[in-house]
Amino acid sequence: MKSVVVTGASTGIGWATAKLLLQRGFRVFGSVRKPADAERLKGEFGANFTALLFDVTDEAAVLAAAREVRAALNGETLAGLVNNAGIAVAGPVLELAVDEFRRQMEVNVIGPIIATQAFTPLLGADPSLTGPKGRIVMISSVAGKNGNPLTPAYAASKHAIEGLSESLRRELMLFGIDVIIVAPGPVKTPIWSKGQEAVDTARYQNSPYLPALQKVGAYMRHLDSIGLPPERIAERVLDALTLSRPKVRYQIAPDPMRHLVTQWLPKRMVDKIIAKRLGLMPPAKG
């Protein structure tokens, strides 16, 4: 039975990915931060699911989980690592606390690095293990190629994941381990449905960005109705793990034509379109 580690398995994309992999005959090790979530998932997913209790930023805990997985594999390789765990922090660059920026990068960038260092030996970088080489799937975002205003920390973290994945894919060719990016657009997951908390407008009451932040917060809450179901993303993760010749990057968006148009339009034109929608145009001179 092939085994896969999925970080951030308690909800959203991670939960849907774990469910689909289990349905397709995989054994899944899913990371959660709360014991209550571990118990819940064991009940939902059954015997072929093992909960790993760690925060991706806690290197010691992640390494301990990797040792647990190694013991369970009994000398065989791991088929996949899905670096999914992440958070979304909103706020303008000029006013977002540096500690919040740091927290965004710690979870979304340093976390995947810690997990990758801990689990990649099990994917086949350790020559003592037997079996086919595994793959790493990095969950990025359309924000990995585009930076929207007022979510700069999130965009920066996903741009970092894109660059990290590109470099890592080439480095791991030495071991025959592939790295594939899955980059969704808006998804119906708690990372966005908590938009009201993510955009804490109370702290920006005296900010010139307040009206735009309110619009961004409202849009985040609206994503519950227009976002992609996480099951769609899980299907692409499955492809990335199982296809004989997967793409290096899969982008999934609710409105692919809109993303295609903004990708090809001149940047200055896209800047103006976004600024007008959010009220970020400078006031007209009287």
Image: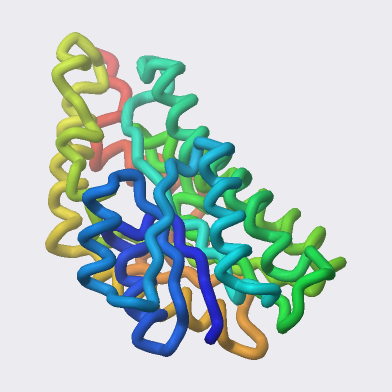
Closer to us: 67 or 139: 67
Q: In this view, does 105 lie above or below 182?
A: above
Residue 68 on image: x %, y %:
55, 58
Residue at position x 47%, y 69% from top?
Answer: 251
Residue found at x 44% / y 72%: 28
Q: Nearer the viewer, residue 111 or 90?
A: 111
Task: State how the image is colored.
Answer: rainbow
- Residue 205 visible in the snapshot: yes
Is residue 241 or residue 28 the one in the foreground? Answer: 28
Residue drawn at x 64%, y 51% is 118
Image quarter where the C terminus lies is top left
Classify 253 as above or below 60.
below
Decide if residue 50 is on the left or right side of residue 2: left
On the image, which quarter does residue 38 sit in?
Answer: bottom left
- Quarter of the image where one finds residue 184: bottom left
Q: In which quarter of the image is residue 88?
A: top left
| Residue 178 image position (x, y, % from top left) | 70, 71
